[in-house]
Amino acid sequence: MITTVIILLISAALFVSGKVRSDLVALCALLALLLFQILVPSEALAGFSNTTVIMMVGLFIVGGGIFQTGLAKMIGGQVIKLAGTSETRLFLLVMLVTALIGGFVSNTGTVALMLPIVVSMAAYANTSSRRLLMPLAFASSMGGMMTLIGTPPNLIIQETLANAKANGLVPASLPDISFFTFLPVGIITLVVGILVLMPLTKMFLTPKSSEKSSKQGGKSLGELVKEYGLSENLFRVHVNEASKVINKTIIDLDIYRKYGVNVIELRRSAGHNKFVRTVNQQLASPTLMLQQGDVLYLSGEIEKVQQLAEDFSLRLIDNHTDEIEGSSSNASLDFYDIGIAEILIMPSSSMIGRKILEIGLRSKFNINVLGIRRQNDYLLHNLGNEKIHDSDVLLVQGAWKDIARLRNESNNWVVLGEPLQEAAKVTLDYKAPVAALIMIAMIVMMCIDSIPVAPVTAVLLAAVMMVITGCVRSVEAAYKTINWQTIVLFAAMLPMSTALEKTGVSSMIADFIVNTFGASSPHVALAAVYFATSIMTIFISNTVTAVLMAPIALQCAIGIGVSPIPFLFAVTVAASMCFASPFSTPPNALVMPAGQYSFMDFVKVGLPLQILMGVVMIFALPLLFAF
């Protein structure tokens, strides 16, 4: 028992200091429990197979899909219209909307759904996401207090009371705990939360310097387009039924040699319906066979483009005409499947002195050269016969996977910036309806008990569908959406509750409460139950704490001779309203990396709220549920 308490205290001290990574502290605590044989390996590793941890992994991917398709930005934009430029209104909307959803969806699911939306809203409103993400996590727990299914501790106290009535421990005349019995309690917690968090977040959750200036090396895709003037020389032609290019390849037409015009890409409609337009971008490879309805993106002088269109009976599309029904009318480069990047030619490169046509970028890497930056000059036309010089920078275009392959030729060039990171920022907005349907289906499966699908199954199914449907660009991109530090932290700390229960620490606390406060006044005993539960929840998951404390609260009420209902509610509220620790509840752990919070941030903001919430509940619960 003493060893377990020592490990717990050392871990808490390291968490508070912030000098060691929180996930490393959690793993070391786990190893200590194994080395001192407090836990066997199966018990110590149980956290990594816990359904909540697995659900968190899936929810990170679902959140990534919501963010990458622009759905988060769309929803956030609608909320911003209500909030305007007021940071206070934005704060209130986040709290209220999150609490409303949290009453019917698990608090973990609520935070995962709202997190990318809130980040987008903060960016759009030019405010710090740090001030919104911690309240988001806390509001999800407050919303969970409004209904029976909002959080597991609610179900635990309902079952405890039902069993006590069935066994004759309490009078059968006591009212049952029903679906909306929790609503008044949930409303009080939300009001207290808003009033306390509004000043605390302003005082303690100020933007970090890294958040204010987070731009790193490398140019964005938009900056490259602007720098090389790609949009100024970009034209579109439509292959109609009378065109002379149908069933011919790019190489057959010999467009570049005859007209000096580059075919940058081709867009082909792969089907269009009322809800989703499938975007099909293809690189203009020499062997690509042209079809009716294709749209070619061309770069060159306007006179040459007009001559090309006239010779082949192609329709030159102006900026007021949609190229494909349902698309944007503006000629612009999109980077859904095809990207651009800069490569710097090394002094030792074998390409120096050779023409662009001779170096074989297209044949080896399926890459086009769109421009050359030579000192302060930009070369954009007739590039095929241009010889490469030392320190030239080539603007290249190709599929993202082919651009990634360029890093293998480090002897010839260096890829500037992080093009794959830029690719991850590209919003797949045409997939937003698909992401919305997946998200709604997941919520429905989690809310409706008659659907025979467990919540963790619904989340994993949604995560896989996000990848299969392309809402997340690839499996690799899906893995990158997962914050493994959060997963390891939470999974490694879960076995601590097993250790505390196994060594008798939890029972010792419970016995102390009954023996010390059992014969006191109901309010004193209620306060003891509440704050004991609140303290335990800092170190043990709220569900485990509720399981341990609910029978103790019941016996304490029976011993005093009062109704057990306010005591049972004290357990569920205290277990759910744990704000002082990032690993006490999954919502706290989920927002920790996104908000760049430290352990002390939760202590500064969450601990005062947790204490004040307890003080209010000690007086409010007896008013709602009489002794």
Image (cartoon, rainbow, N blue to C red):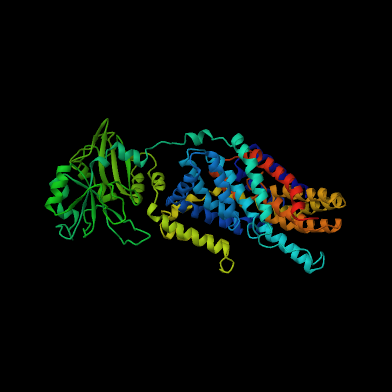
Residue at image position (79%, 54%) is: 507
User: As rendered, which of 224 and 145 lies closer to the eye?
Assistant: 145
Point out residue 100 in the picture as x, y percentages from the top left corner: 58, 53
Query: Measuring 35% from the left and 49% from the top, which residue is drawn there?
Result: 400
User: In the rendered image, which quarter is residue 169 located in?
Assistant: bottom right
Residue 127 versus residue 62 in the image, above or below = above
Residue 253 spot, x, y in % from top left: 15, 53
Q: Give the side of residue 381 with respect to residue 130, left or right.
A: left
Where is residue 132 drawn, in percent x and y? Answer: 55, 42
Is 359 situated left or right of 124 in this image? left
Which of these two is toward me, 136 or 189? 189
Q: Does residue 541 appear anywhere in the picture?
A: no
Q: In the drawing, does residue 96 fall left or right of residue 330?
A: right
| Quadrant where the image shows the C terminus | bottom right
Comparing 383 with 387, the one in front is 383
Tell me, yes or no, if residue 366 can be seen here. Answer: yes
Rendering coords of residue 315 (x, y %): 18, 53
Of residues 361 and 64, the one nearer the viewer is 64
Q: List the single residue furthest toward the top.
A: 376
Q: Residue at x 18, y 45 (%)?
A: 261
Q: Residue at x 44, y 57 (%)?
A: 435
Total marks placed: 0
> Left or right: 70 with respect to 21?
left
